[in-house]
């Protein structure tokens, strides 16, 4: 019988110091020994959303306390730790580091900061491309035409990221995009892409009955590509607060969840997180496809949930992917 993947879910009452809960959750999930060898280089990917016109509301971004708890725990294995983000149309990675007081963590723990958009990038060979192209697949086209066709659709990622142990530390929130729908560990990795104009590249604009709306399917496709070459090696989901409802992640309803979720399989962690908020992640095409591609575990029957009883911590999220939901999000971010 195949051993089931462990996902730890623990509740905390101490929102100001989540270290003990994070440590216990990681221990229940199997610890860091398989993922982090002594003095490995580790990149941490929190969710540091930039919305210049909106104040930060609880559940919008990874909590400072959770991020610090993960840093302290990882430092028990290695001192080589970096926090990674990228520039977007809504602001630079440095804007995000400033907004969420990340520089204080850098000073306190001697961390490195990585801005994907300014790093040395490596062209990645994707075994089964879903959005980006396989450059070798265009070898029948002569240069310079080949470069013209592939230039904007070759996956390039920071060399430091590719050589690191990668930990995704997302919050729990809904998205107005029906193809990604929820931001957990896998969706959080979209933020390592160096492209600045991500919205224009990955969101195809359509008109339906005179109203514009976004087709965000290419976000999900790109995640399948990222996870073939630089998947998260560990997921620690910051579920202290959640955010859901119309216009999320810019607006919506903050909800106190008090949870930390940990697993060596980020797809499994997200599957459990979806169950907690009342959403079957296999309804999303890229989760269903990830299973067929062998990228991770997405079936609950293949997951061993340790810690809390699932039924005692469920909180159904309101998922709004309507045109009105899009309008509220667009207004909030100034699109």
Image (spheres, rainbow, N blue to C red):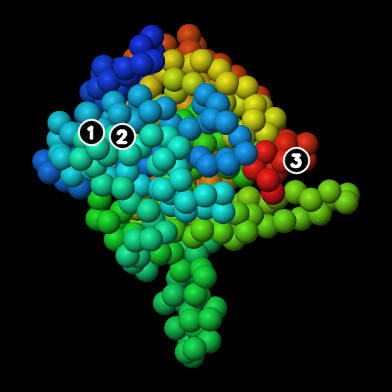
Q: How many marks?
A: 3
* Label of residue 38 in the image: none
Write down the residue under mark 2. Answer: 104
Mark closer to the observer (2, 3)? 2
Residue 76 screen position, x and y as percent = 15, 31
Residue 253 screen position, x and y as percent = 62, 22
Residue 165 visible in the displayed image: no
Residue 12 screen position, x and y as percent = 37, 12
Comparing 92 with 326, the one in front is: 92
Write down the residue under mark 1. Answer: 108
In the depicted structure, whether residue 89 falls above or below residue 313: below
Mark closer to the observer (3, 1)? 1
Q: CA distance from mark 2 to mark 3?
A: 35 Å
Seen at 79% across and 50% down, the residue is: 212
Which element carries disc 3, helix, strand or loop? helix
Comparing 258 with 67, the one in front is: 67
Q: CA distance from mark 1 to mark 2?
A: 6 Å
Residue farthest to the right, as pictured: 209
Residue neighbourhood size for the residue with mark 1, other residues' Cα within 10 Å, grouped as few (<14), some (14–19), many (≥20): few
* Mark sitting earlier along the chain (2/3): 2
Seen at 45% across and 37% down, the residue is: 99
Residue 156 visible in the displayed image: yes
Quick one: quadrant of the N terminus?
top left
């Amino acid at each position: 019988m195949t051993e089931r993947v462990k996902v730890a879910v623990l509740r905390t009452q101490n929102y100001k110091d989540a270290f003990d809960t994070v440590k216990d959750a990681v221990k229940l999930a199997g610890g860091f020994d398989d993922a982090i060898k002594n003095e490995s280089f580790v990149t941490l990917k929190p969710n540091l959303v930039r919305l210049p016109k909106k104040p930060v509301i609880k559940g919008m971004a990874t909590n400072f306390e959770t991020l610090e708890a993960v840093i302290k725990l990882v430092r028990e294995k290695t001192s080589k730790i970096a926090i990674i983000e990228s520039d977007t149309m809504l602001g630079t990675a440095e804007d995000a580091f400033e907004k969420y007081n990340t520089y204080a963590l850098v000073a306190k723990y001697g961390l490195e900061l990585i801005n994907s958009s300014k790093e040395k990038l490596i062209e990645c060979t994707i075994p089964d491309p879903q959005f980006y192209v396989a450059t070798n697949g265009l070898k029948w086209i002569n240069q310079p035409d080949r470069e013209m066709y592939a230039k904007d659709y070759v996956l390039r990622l920071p060399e430091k990221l590719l050589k690191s142990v990668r930990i995704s530390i997302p919050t729990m929130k809904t998205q107005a995009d029906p193809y990604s729908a929820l931001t957990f560990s896998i969706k959080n990795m979209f933020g390592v892409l160096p492209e600045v104009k991500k919205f224009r590249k990955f969101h195809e604009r359509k008109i339906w009955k005179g109203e514009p709306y976004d087709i965000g399917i290419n976000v999900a496709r790109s995640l399948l590509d990222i996870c073939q070459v630089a998947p998260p090696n560990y997921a620690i989901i910051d579920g202290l607060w959640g955010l859901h409802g119309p216009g999320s992640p810019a607006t919506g309803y903050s909800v106190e969840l008090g949870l930390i979720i940990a697993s060596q399989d980020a797809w499994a962690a997200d599957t459990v997180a979806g169950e907690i908020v009342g959403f079957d992640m296999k309804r999303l095409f890229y989760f269903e496809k990830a299973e067929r591609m062998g990228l991770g575990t997405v079936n609950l029957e293949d997951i061993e949930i340790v810690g809390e009883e699932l039924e005692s911590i469920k909180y159904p999220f309101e998922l709004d992917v309507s045109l009105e939901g899009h309008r509220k999000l667009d207004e909030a971010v100034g699109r």
